[in-house]
Amino acid sequence: MTRKHKPDLMSAEKLDELSRDKFIRPMPKRFYKEVSVTGEDPAFGIALDGRALKTPLKAPLAIPGRELAEAIAAEWNAQTEFINPALMPLTKLVNTTIDRVAPERSRIIAEITSFADADLICYRAESPAAFMELQSRHWDPVLEWAAKALQTPFHTTTAILHKSQPPAALSALGNLLESFNSHQLCAIHNLSTLTGSALLGTALGSCALTWDAAWTAAHVDEDWQISHWGEDAEAVARRAGRKREFEATANYLRMVS
């Protein structure tokens, strides 16, 4: 079935695309030889030839945890002749957290809760029965978790047009999101975009769902269509790109939780 879509939350990849000029800018050349991890708990840093790396808005790059710091250092070490930001998803996420999410937590939480008002897993098919069963199998456990965690349910619908969720459910979701640190919140925002579901993103953030279960749940509709009509090469490439970003974001979430 088709539902009325609200504007998608923008992933870091989408924001990059919108910010580009109509002509592709050349990638900067690698200007450093050595990458090192600096600092100690609770804030590590990255140094390029001994000089501290900063965010795009020139804030100190404070990384929570050695594992994440070493993973980000590995991204910088992996660059060869040129620096390709598309191959540095963890760097992008930590920069986004520091420059965008931490200073604007209320706005980010409001975006996620607004997106939950038209959540993917709340819009159900009326037929065929096998498709309905597939949606229920993958989506109902998430709704059951949400009802327990939030102490109020989200409602499902078979309507094509948007149907608002109870204000109490959205308010409870916002309160839950307040409990996450800014790094977790950045990851949940990105995962909500990539899955089409704020509830899936929040369940991942709450360790109530594995990343592979969330990925499968997010693609129930798409996989059903593929099983009946097939897929083209362009769609396969787009999905592969989304999955790479999804896996990197899920890994980031694990390391900052």
Image (spheres, rainbow, N blue to C red):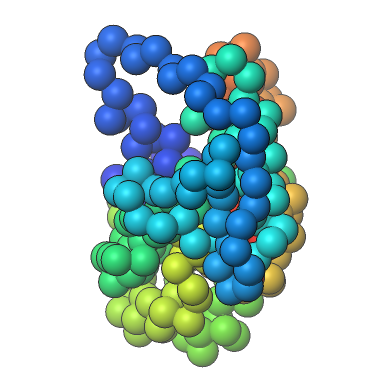
Is 145 drawn above or below residue 77 in the view shown? Answer: below
Residue visible at 44% across and 20% down in the picture:
28
Counting the numbered discs, the total is 0
- Nearest to the observer: residue 229 or residue 7: 7
Is 185 drawn above or below residue 172 in the view shown? Answer: above
Where is residue 35 shown, x and y percent of the image? 63, 40
* Position of residue 19 in the picture relative to residue 148 (left or right): left
Residue visible at 57% across and 38% down in the picture:
49
Where is residue 232 shown, x and y percent of the image? 61, 13
Can the viewer see residue 17? yes
Assign the C terminus to one quadrant of the image: bottom right
Q: Single out the residue that lies furthest toward the front.
A: 50
* Position of residue 82 in the picture relative to residue 229 (left or right): left
Residue visible at 38% across and 77% down in the picture:
174
Where is residue 204 shown, x and y percent of the image? 63, 64
Is 225 drawn above or below residue 126 in the view shown? Answer: above
- Nearest to the observer: residue 182 or residue 170: 182
Is 107 drawn above or below residue 190 in the view shown? Answer: below
